[in-house]
Amino acid sequence: MKTAIKHMNADQIRSEIDAIERKRQAINAEQDDLFDRSEALAIQRRELTGKLSEIGKRLFEIAKSTTTVRGEVDGLFVQNSNLAEKVEEIMLAERVVYREIEASFSRDAALDRRENLVMKRSRELQSEAA
């Protein structure tokens, strides 16, 4: 990459700067989307965790009472299990989004390095022209 940039002329440098800017805008839009997805998943996880807590409290109340309705207990255990599975799925989706965010930041860092090399070459061309 360094060698190719060192041999670019002024027009190629301007074109490369434009391409870098377009890529940066795309990465920024992607990161905005990823952060929105991450926040939505976190909200879902918090809501489901709250429901799990409510079911757990109700199960505890039932366990303390002497008049337990077996059907209600079974239903709550099923709900509890289903919600726990959904929370696990959401947490997995969050991990996927976090990996995508990390990859996006890596691409952004690579773009920064390329931009620095292009700008260095641009300055060299300007000093040669002067």
Image (spheres, rainbow, N blue to C red):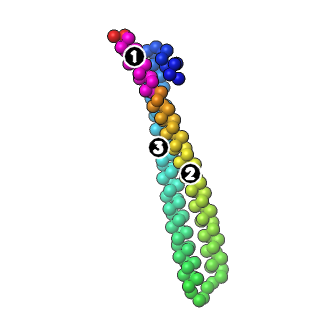
- Label 1: which secondary element: helix
User: Is 93 inside the magenta-drawn segment?
Assistant: no
User: Residue 51 — which label?
Assistant: none
Q: Position of residue 59 (x, y in %)?
A: 57, 78
Q: Position of residue 126 (x, y in %)?
A: 37, 15
Q: Position of residue 48 (x, y in %)?
A: 54, 64
The residue where tag 2 is placed is 95
Q: Residues within 10 Å of mark 3 (few under 14, many from 20)?
A: few
Which amino acid type is marked by label 2? Arg
Is the residue under label 2 in contact with that under label 1 (CB below 8 Å)? no
| Quarter that holds the C terminus | top left
- The foreground one among 115 and 28 is 115
Numbered range of the magenta stretch: 115-128
Which amino acid type is marked by label 3? Asp
Q: Is residue 88 left or right of residue 42?
A: right
Closest to the camera, between mark 3 and mark 2, is 2
Residue at (53% x, 48% y) in the render: 98
The residue where tag 1 is placed is 124
Q: Residue furthest top?
A: 129
Q: Quadrant of residue 79?
A: bottom right
- Label 3: which secondary element: helix
Residue at (58% x, 61% y) in the render: 87
The residue where tag 3 is placed is 32
Q: Residue furthest left?
A: 130
Q: Judge whether residue 18 can be spotted in this image.
A: no
Residue at (65% x, 82% y) in the render: 70
Q: Position of residue 116 (x, y in %)?
A: 43, 26
- Label 2: which secondary element: helix
- The foreground one among 3 and 86 is 3
Count of numbered labels shown in the rendering: 3
**Is 24 rendered above or below residue 15?**
below
Mark closer to the chain start, 1 or 3: 3
